[in-house]
Image: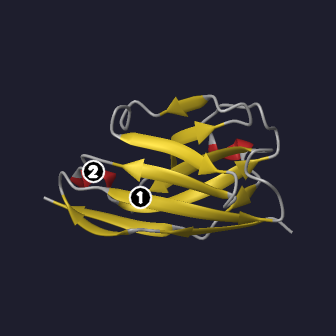
Amino acid sequence: QVQLVESGGGSVQAGGSLRLSCAASGYTVSSYSMAWFRQAPGKEREGVAVINSLGSLTYANSVKGRFTISRDYAKNTLYLEMNSLKPEDTAMYYCAANPASLRLVLGSREYTYWGQGTQVTVSS
């Protein structure tokens, strides 16, 4: 059974940093395409970053140069390093997995498995 558990969210001031983690079980993070999404109150879920099984990456324009997606094979964990945080980054952040391992898409419909989310709040 595939399970994804996020952690690392919290409250920071603008300009600060956070690292989100997504611990995976039931499969290996290297075998699926994996992504981070976020959803702010009253807004649609937005794709933030994706990494496929070959290690290719895609980022939303809004986070390019500030966020970095990565994975640790030994820990079977996906990460999102977030720097230079802005108030508009405030949202619930979710990790997701797509068994189509080579896909590099930020559309949420592509993803089969989802975590429960971790809240990120950035104050000005």
Which residue is outermost to the left? 124
The mark nearer the N terminus, 2 or 1, is 1
What residue is rendered at 36% in x and 50% in y?
A: 82
Contact (Cβ within 8 Å) of mark 2 with mark 1: no
Residue under circle 2?
Answer: 88
Against 93, residue 44 (above or below) is above
Name the amino acid type tagged 2: Glu
| Image quarter (top left, top right, bottom left or bottom right) of the C terminus | bottom left
46 over 39 or under it: above or below? above
In this view, the mark in front (2 or 1)? 1
Disc 2 residue crowd, few under 14, some 14–19, many 20+, Cα 10 Å? few
Residue that mark 1 sits on: 19
Q: Is residue 15 left or right of residue 19?
A: left
Q: How many marks?
A: 2
Q: Is residue 20 visible?
A: yes
Q: Quick check: 120 left or right of 29?
A: left
Report helix, strand or loop for mark 1.
strand
**Rendered location of residue 60, percent (x, y):** 45, 34
Question: Where, by quadrant of the figure, is residue 9 drawn?
Answer: bottom left
